[in-house]
Amino acid sequence: IASTIASVPNSKEMECSRCHASGTNPATRPSMGWVHDPNPLKDDRYNILRLHDDLQAGSAVYQNALVTVGYDPAGLEATVRNQATPVLCARCHPSNALPGSGFASVTPMTQAMHSGHAQVLDSMGDSLNQAVGRASCYACHPGDVTQCLRGAMGKAIGADGHLAMDCQGCHGTMADVGSPTRQGWFEEPNCQACHAGSATQNPGQIRYTSVFDALGNMRVPTTDLFATDPNTPAAGFSLFRFSTGHGNLQCSACHGPPHAIYPTSEVNDNLQSIVLQGHEGTLQECSACHTSLSSAQRVQGPHGMHPSNSSWVNGQHGDWVESHGSTSCRECHGSDARGSVLSEAKTDRSYNTTYGTKQLYRGYQVGCYNCHDGPGTDDSNNNSAPSVQSFAVQTPNDEPLPIQMLGSDPNNTPLVYKIIQQPQHGTVGWSGSTATYFPKAGYVGGDSFQYAAWDGEAQSPR
């Protein structure tokens, strides 16, 4: 009997109390005054119900809804206090997350919440609709501690040392999410709007950090290499969480859920991958599911992927190229066969080959020139790989530190530097050969990160 390990996220981190706790934001004070309930877990909720009653006072739609669902005609606060009945928003507000919920005459839940809060001002006096970053979203969606957006995209660090992706890059502004013309939970970003093509066919980049093009429209991919299923789960929609592939498996079976794409920053999320294939990240080891593969099956993996084992390296990939050519290889390994972000190793690997022992590590860019002198020959590549130096530096607490990355190349080839592993207690940005370490606020102690250099044909050891 097959078995696996799964983690189930659970959080009650909703920070409504930031604005709705008694005595906080004057703009949210109900007309009857703050509730000042002695139970802090109930205080902000009573204030919200009281404010909701204020906003809907005199509304015939509201009165009809209260009566229809069996709530107290005096309002939501009275329903809780007099009937001891909890209030479920979707009893009145329709939500596509709960099919059949709500009334057609009542504003949908997604629209009501997001459009209603879009013009709320934060502590700096800016509207939440203008916010860039996760702080405004994490006030309601869990959260600063929980880190709902915790997957590979959520923890990615850009060249400036800051988070590379934020909520708005996929979902747009709060007003966009709350638009009356939008179908909540269905009109969502799709994978191919960022993962827009291969190394040989793409609209300018292989991948992006926002689904929106320069005109603000969702980007149209060049190929469907990483596309979700069209008209899924209904006509006009194309959702990752309903899409399937590779033997009708759910995409999330290998990649994880939308906000926790493997590998994530939460250790428990990564356990399934580690148990099944020996390392974290998207399930990409064929042996995790298959005991054996035919010659044809070796190149029928998800997105055209092939095995990464010793058998493929020592002979099978060469046989494929000799019989089929290298065109399909270049989709991931680059138009010049020198590698791309799509051909980076997903874990540390060691291969004993006719060209010597090849030590790869997570983030190593794999191309033909790593071993032989290009895709058209079996001759060994005599290029010597570059090297980088390890060293220690210091910075005062909370101060960014510019660091000169030190690399050399035996052939005096200009080097391109990259960060291989981010530090645990901060982040690192980079420009050219200069890295900048940004420590986490208040952190005191040691930390480390890994970098490498590439000379166009081979990558240095870490």
Image: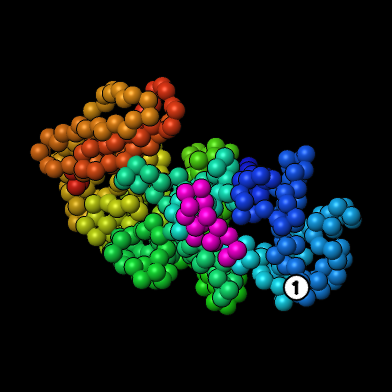
On whether residue 126 falls in the magenta region, the answer is: yes
Relative to the observer, which residue lies in front, 368 or 239?
Answer: 239
Q: Residue extending furthest right?
A: 83
For the stretch drawn in magenta, what is the main secondary structure? loop
Taking the image as shown, residue 68 lies to the left or right of residue 430, namely right
Query: Which residue is drawn at the image coordinates 41% and 54% (left, top)?
Result: 306
Find numbered disc 1 in the image and state the secondary structure of the residue it sits on: loop
Answer with the quarter of the image where residue 415 lies. Answer: top left
Kindly identify which residue carries mark 1.
59
Query: Which residue is drawn at the image coordinates 61% and 49% (left, top)?
Result: 25
Relative to the observer, which residue lies in front, 407 or 49?
Answer: 49
Q: Amino acid at mark 1?
A: Ser
Answer with the quarter of the image where residue 424 lies. Answer: top left
Query: Which residue is drawn at the image coordinates 32% and 49% (left, top)?
Result: 315
Measured as percent of width and height from the top left, residue 371 is found at: 23, 44
| Above/below status of 175 relative to 254 | below
Query: Which residue is drawn at the image coordinates 32% and 33% (left, top)?
Result: 400
Relative to the observer, which residue lies in front, 55 or 277?
Answer: 55
Q: Which residues are magenta?
A: 115-129
Q: How many neighbours does mark 1 have within 10 angstroms: few (below 14), some (14-19), or many (20 or more)? A: few
Instruction: Tell me if I can see residue 15 in this picture.
Output: no
| Above/below status of 97 relative to 231 | above
Placement of the C terminus among the 4 image quadrants: top left
Relative to the observer, which residue lies in front, 151 or 381?
Answer: 151
On whether residue 35 falls in the magenta region, the answer is: no
Taking the image as shown, residue 277 lies to the left or right of residue 317, namely right
Measured as percent of width and height from the top left, residue 313 is found at: 34, 46
Measured as percent of width and height from the top left, residue 423 is found at: 39, 33
| Above/below status of 123 relative to 224 | above
